């Protein structure tokens, strides 16, 4: 996404209404492109495109970006956005009204902080710059008190992204949860008992 | 608007279709009575309406249920602590009131923990001077516990033999499932601390039983079992009652009051159709209230007449008083030994496989009555809330983001245990429900106002729970995830009503001046009015109450059948 030029953005936006795309400034288009990419990944996974219900296109682009910074793809599973976590975040904030002001305001806090430091909003900052901000708000116990509002926002978002990712089909598989199927219970396997140093009574 | 009256006069009208009402319906119909069963909510069938095998990712909520499903989106119980249009109010203290609104009531999702009260539990006052003794003994109710065990089917073992604890009666059991890995680890720590850990007793079938299939170990009993392999009123009690051809079920029938005649005897029940909002009256020769402890008290208090100016069965003024819930608190702990455990299908049955009965000696403890411990932990189905607050996990990186964080979520999955205490609140006149003089629900029925606070007795019990659970977690090499609460925080005791074990609001007793019901759960003031829920309990115990609700309901129903045969009702 960082290397996108306007033309590429418009190509990506091909799936969205052309009128809307033409009305975008370059910055808006780039944000929308991020969203479109995420939506496309979801569409590929679920067969339907996701349209945020609570967040604006620009806010949602930031959510998608943050979600993948929190849970990136690794050798065991895909990223948060590939598993649909941003859709879950949008849905939950949409149905739980008490979260809405904090979510919207937290994103605004993040952009303000990014503008103050780098003269760019969070999505337009470089990856290393984004991480500088996250390093200041991702560790509550160590964080400087002047970042307390960002800390609060990020902790809440991390929880939602985690729940969205790990409860997804990909997340469940990654964790190795093997239940929710009919079976016959005969206790824990020997390897588990051995690891814990416990055994069944005869 | 006119009241639609049923032409038929039933032998018995039962209000409520949960543990008590379902049992009464089975026993009474099988004894030959024509029974009409009123349920405030819709029909519900776990085979059709249950969400067994649903995945959290089948829904955008990922299992979050909100106020409408406080136990999760796929939970089998229709209802909650807050029901739209059905408020309740608080006088003194705090209280939360969970109500089920569907056929089967709260049995559609309960914990299936099926414990008999022991001999000591019926004579608390004689033992320590607190509360009151029951008008019946363990020997009076034992035959009905036996009938229940045999008919419903529960797994378990002889706890008295396992532990030497005399107040843990034997029963008739199916074989218990082997413990899960984390339960064995908890037991190992408890063994060192001399805390007894025994197989739990749950009404879940580990073998085929009375025409019902054995459990298939999906661990989702709370969602309603499509194979009827666990106990719910709808799976176990209602079907045989229907089979007699003598049961009529009125769904969406929200009882308003018990109707009485000039002699003060019940002649039926008036109710509102909760969907059409039409007014009805059904006639019966006897009325069984099994609407749940507080709802039955509310009905009696709202059934005022010249013969019963303070409400039906309330010449003593005790209806609504002596309301108790189980004490309850949980402590969770992070146990490093449980990190990186090889994965396996650890679902088992829908509940704990091991359990800790009350083992303490109160003479040495400074507080009366005890509690049991429910064990939790393991590899549950990931859903809403998974990994929440990871920045606070003991020995974690304190938050962060990226691949390291992702790996941390994996390592902490299954590395927590939880210990939940459920104990006995000593009954007191100060804890009560009463009719709020100013508030009605959407049907125009006056609502309940609750008064409930924990006393020093419960606080000391809560402190003992906290200290014990923390010592078990520490013995396991773990770290509790929360700090020890203070006395001002009631040591972490849940607000009354949150444990959903309400009892005592229509208590039994031999003295008509200090109790609403006699030893047969029959109103002192009206011989054809009975209560078959937690209301008649003279005291709680350190054991969950459902099995005793059902044993008492069975006993009461046999008494009603016998009285009918004698022509007394």
Image (cartoon, coloured by chain):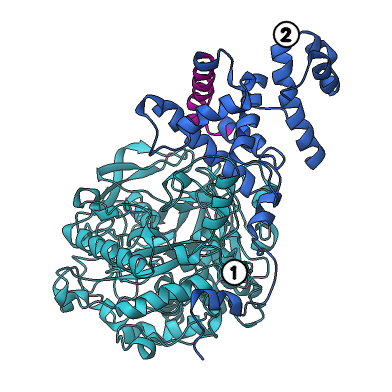
Chain colours: A blue, B cyan
Label 2 Cα crowd, 10 Å radius (few <14 / some 14-19 / many 20+) = few
x and y, in percent, of residue B268 in the image: 46, 58
Extreme-front residue of the structure: A128
Which region of the structure is painted magenta? A95-115
Q: What is the spatial separation of the Cα atoms under label 1 and label 2, in whole angstroms?
A: 54 Å
Q: Mark number for residue B496?
A: none
User: In this picture, is B400 found above or below B419?
Assistant: above
> In which chain is the residue bearing label 1?
B
Give B468 or B536, whichever is nearer the viewer: B468
Q: Quadrant of residue A176?
A: bottom right
- For the question of whether residue A16 can be seen, the reply is no
x and y, in percent, of residue B123 in the image: 23, 78
State the residue position of label 2: A25
Quarter of the image with the N terminus of chain A in it:
top right
B186 relative position to B53: left or right:
left
B91 relative position to B12: left or right:
left
Q: Residue at x 52, y 79 (%)?
A: B154
State the residue position of label 1: B346
Q: How many marks?
A: 2
């Amino acid at each position: 996404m960082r290397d996108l030029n306007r033309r590429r953005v418009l190509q990506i936006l091909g799936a969205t209404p052309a009128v809307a795309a033409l009305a975008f400034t370059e910055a808006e288009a780039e944000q929308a492109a991020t969203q479109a990419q995420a939506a496309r990944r979801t569409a590929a996974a679920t067969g339907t495109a996701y349209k945020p219900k609570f967040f604006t296109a620009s806010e949602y682009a930031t959510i998608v970006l943050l979600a993948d910074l929190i849970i990136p793809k690794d050798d065991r599973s895909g990223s948060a956005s590939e598993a649909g976590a941003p859709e879950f975040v949008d849905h939950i904030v949409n149905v739980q009204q008490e979260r809405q002001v904090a979510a919207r305001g937290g994103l605004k806090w993040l952009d303000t902080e990014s503008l103050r430091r780098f003269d760019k909003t969070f999505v337009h900052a470089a990856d290393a710059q984004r991480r500088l901000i996250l390093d200041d708000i991702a560790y509550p116990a160590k964080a400087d008190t002047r970042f307390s509002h960002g800390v609060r926002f990020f902790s809440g978002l991390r929880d939602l992204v985690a729940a969205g990712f790990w409860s997804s089909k990909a997340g469940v598989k990654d964790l190795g949860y093997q239940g929710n199927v009919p079976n016959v219970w005969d206790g824990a396997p020997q390897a588990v008992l051995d690891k814990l140093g416990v055994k069944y009574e005869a | 608007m006119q009241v639609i009256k049923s032409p038929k006069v039933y032998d018995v009208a039962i209000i409520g279709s949960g543990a008590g009402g379902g049992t009464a319906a089975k026993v009474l119909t099988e004894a030959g009575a024509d029974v009409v069963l009123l349920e405030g909510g819709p029909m519900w069938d776990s085979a059709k309406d249950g969400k067994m095998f649903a995945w959290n990712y089948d829904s955008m909520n990922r299992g979050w249920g909100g106020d409408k499903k406080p136990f999760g989106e796929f939970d089998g119980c229709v209802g909650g602590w807050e029901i739209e249009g059905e408020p309740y109010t608080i006088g003194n203290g705090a209280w939360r009131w969970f109500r089920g609104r569907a056929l089967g009531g709260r049995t559609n999702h309960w914990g299936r923990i099926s414990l008999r009260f022991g001999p000591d539990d019926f004579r608390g006052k004689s033992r320590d001077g607190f509360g009151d003794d029951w008008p019946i003994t363990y020997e009076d109710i034992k035959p009905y516990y036996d009938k229940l065990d045999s008919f419903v089917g529960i797994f378990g073992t002889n706890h008295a033999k396992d532990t030497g604890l005399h107040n843990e009666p034997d029963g008739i059991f199916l074989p218990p499932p082997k413990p899960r890995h984390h339960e064995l680890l908890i037991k190992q720590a408890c063994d060192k601390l001399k805390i007894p850990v025994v197989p739990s007793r749950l009404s879940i079938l580990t073998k085929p039983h009375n025409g019902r299939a054995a459990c298939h170990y999906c661990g989702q009993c709370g969602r309603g079992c499509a194979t009827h392999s666990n106990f719910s009123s709808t799976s176990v009690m209602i079907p045989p009652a229907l089979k007699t051809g003598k049961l009529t079920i009125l769904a969406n029938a929200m009882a308003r009051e018990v109707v009485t005649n000039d002699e003060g005897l019940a002649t039926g029940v008036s109710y509102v159709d909760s969907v059409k909002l039409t007014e009805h009256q059904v006639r019966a020769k006897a009325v069984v209230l099994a609407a749940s402890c507080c709802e039955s008290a509310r009905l009696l208090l709202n059934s005022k007449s010249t013969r019963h100016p303070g409400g039906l069965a309330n010449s003593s003024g005790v209806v609504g008083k002596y309301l108790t819930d189980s004490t309850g608190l949980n402590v969770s702990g992070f146990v490093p030994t449980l990190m990186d455990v090889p994965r396996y299908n650890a679902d088992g049955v829908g509940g704990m496989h091991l359990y800790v009965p009350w083992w303490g000696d109160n003479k040495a403890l400074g507080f009366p009555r005890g509690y049991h411990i429910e064990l939790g932990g393991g590899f549950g189905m990931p859903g809403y809330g998974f990994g929440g607050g990871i920045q606070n996990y003991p020995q974690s990186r304190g938050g962060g983001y990226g691949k390291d964080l992702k790996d941390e979520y994996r390592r902490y999955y299954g590395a927590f245990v939880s210990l939940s205490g459920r104990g006995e609140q000593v009954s007191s006149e100060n804890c009560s429900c009463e009719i709020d003089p100013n508030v009605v629900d959407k049907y125009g029925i006056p609502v309940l106002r609750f008064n409930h606070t924990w006393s020093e007795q419960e606080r000391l019990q809560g402190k003992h729970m906290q200290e014990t659970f923390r010592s078990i977690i520490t013995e396991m090499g773990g770290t509790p995830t929360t700090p020890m609460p203070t006395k001002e925080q009631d040591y972490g005791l849940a607000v009354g009503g949150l444990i959903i074990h309400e009892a005592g609001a229509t208590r039994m007793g031999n003295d008509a001046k200090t109790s609403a019901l006699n030893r047969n759960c029959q109103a002192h003031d009206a011989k054809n009015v009975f209560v078959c829920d937690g209301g008649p309990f003279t005291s709680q115990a350190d054991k969950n109450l459902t099995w005793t609700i059902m044993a008492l309901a069975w006993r009461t129903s046999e008494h009603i059948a016998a009285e009918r045969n004698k022509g007394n009702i």
